[in-house]
Image (spheres, rainbow, N blue to C red):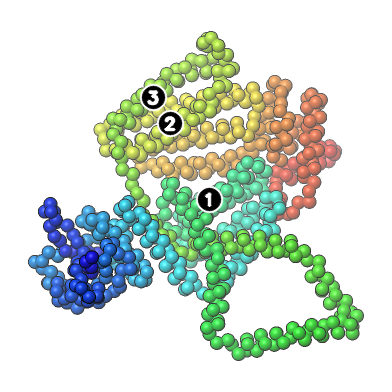
Amino acid sequence: MNKFVQAIIINKSSILCKTKNNENDQVINIPISTELLEGETPNQGLEKLIREQFSTNYDIVFKLSKETYSNTTTFLVNINNIDILNEKIEGKNFRWVSFNDKNSFTFNEKLLLSNLLLACIDNNYSADWIEPIRDMVSSDSRLSYSNSTIISKIRSREHKNMDNNTHMKEKAFAVLVAIFLGFIYNTFFFSKAYGASYPIFTALIILIFFYNFRRNIKKAKPIGIFILGIAFILSLNFAVHSNRILNFLNVIAVPMLLTASFLLIRYEGIEWGSIKFVVTVFERIIPSTFENIFKPILFAKGNIEKRERGKLNPQTKSILIGLLVSVPILIVILPLLSSADSVFGYYTSNFYTSFRNINIGSTLWDIIKIAVVALYLFGFFWSFRYSYTKDTKPSKVNGKLEPITVLTVLVIINLVYLLFSIVQFSYLYGGGTVLPNGFTYAEYARRGFFELVLVTIINFTILILATMYTKKENPLKAVLNGAYTLLIVFTFNMLYSAHYKMSLYENTFGYTYLRIFVHLFLILLFILFLIVLIGIWFSKIPVARLSIIAALLMYVFINFVNVDSIIVKKNIERYYDTGKIDVHYLYVLSYDAVPHVLKFAEDSSIDDSIRKKLLDYSNLKRDALSKDWKWFEFNYSMYKAEDALVKNMNPSK
């Protein structure tokens, strides 16, 4: 099989190519190459190629280890005098092709250039033309694997350089901070109730982040500070309310929001109004962090090896020898001195006893927990020392849907929703029209809630996809906007209908977490549809970003609106109206409900059977609060509940 050698010659942001005609008389670019003769080495073939074609001096920068074609050796070549080269190629089938002219390169040529990029990274070689090649490679979806490999290699090289250039004192400080946080975490959270500890720990994480990267933060994005504020406010909820559902969600939400805010504050140019940013947050929490968790061990190993390679300080060596010699001497002397002096013996025996009282198993388990948390937090913070490597530039969505197709779909859907709305106004809201046989008004009003919510979500999806993928420039734009608006108006009716049905359902069966959260979710959907409606008529409005901000603010509102208090108040109101209440459901509510339940129990007009259940409720909550709580487990709702229980037992206080 024939063997070849190729030369890559680059000047500024252009590569030298040779052209030839193929069978279809089309001009194509091919690398500058020559066939090797029998027994000829690649280096000899390269020298022959440059001498025959250009008769000029050259230097080999490096050889590519990965080849695009089999039996082909490729070199990156530096021509010493470009002006002479240009004179030699004049009138021949050579030309400079700019990397910015992406359409001039075939797929194989782009693959060759991606291999060149990998070689540049492996050889720690930098040049101005590398970035234009990266842009070209990343823009071709067929080279996604090569692009991912390039990004991985760039990241690995950068991480290695950063780690090597960081002083050992700085590394040691980072490890000590992580151990400190691990100790605090173990003290605050393992087998402890979440309370004031959560916002305190969150504040520590924020302070350490800003201290570590104070030199890297040039100008923090307002959105980064906003999300950081949201995260801290949510952490405060652990010390204010005790709703288990929201606490569970916040255990996930707060770390994610902190990570998102740290990314936006630490790095510039990150696009946050997209799904890609959410993926970036997850990558930072898991893979990027786990890439660095064992760095302290590697740093320590490297430092030991470095010291071993160097000469040990004579003074340090003498001290170490002295310490080793002292150990056997002390083993003999201490027992003798303890026997000679009873007071000295008393203190030494107490010293030994203190060690015997240590629970080795418990201590070892604490050390393991602290170590695990410390390693994770070290890896998390250390990952922010590296620069942010983007895989590709933000992709623009190209509208492909025909406007007339989208309009047809919208017209049909809107006609169906018009009929649905007429029925709603006739039977549901009016209540005066006779229903068909087999229907009762109560049954009709309460059914179909979840179906309405599902249709609402489908409408939201249709709106987003249609506005994103429909061709932007079209004569039907105003008509489409009108159809979008009509769809949103009908959706508003569905949202109100769903709210109305849920309210009727609550009046019949009572109030629960799910039913209250559903109302709040409907309010959020209304706000999101309103933002989309504004964005339809004012295209410059950042719909995605405003929607994210609205969702975050709504989530904060849900955390602090005191859902448990609303539920218990509404159920008590329903009892006075209907005489019905599910006392057992009150048991699952948080401590926020306790003062309201105890006040309800004081009403002499309530049924005795209900009063007995409420007495059991108060005893159960009293037992739960009888635990000896630590100061960092403080929770305001628990404090208020305990105070209400004390007053309930001693009305005079």
- Residue at 55 percent across and 87 percent down: it is 311
- Residue at 38 percent across and 37 percent down: it is 465
SS for dot 2? helix
Circle 3 crowding by C-alpha within 10 Å: few under 14, some 14–19, many from 20 = many
Circle 2 crowding by C-alpha within 10 Å: few under 14, some 14–19, many from 20 = some
**Label 1 amino acid?**
Leu
Q: Quadrant of the N terminus?
A: bottom left
**Label 3 amino acid?**
Asn
Q: Measuring from the top left, give residue 134's x and y in whole percent.
A: 32, 60
- Distance from Cα at disc 2 to Cα at disc 1: 28 Å
Check the image and report above or below for 370 versus 481.
below
Q: Nearer the viewer, residue 529 or 589?
A: 589
State the mark number for residue 459.
2
- Distance from Cα at disc 3 to Cα at disc 1: 38 Å
Q: Measuring from the top left, give residue 163's x and y in whole percent.
A: 48, 70
State the mark number for residue 257.
1
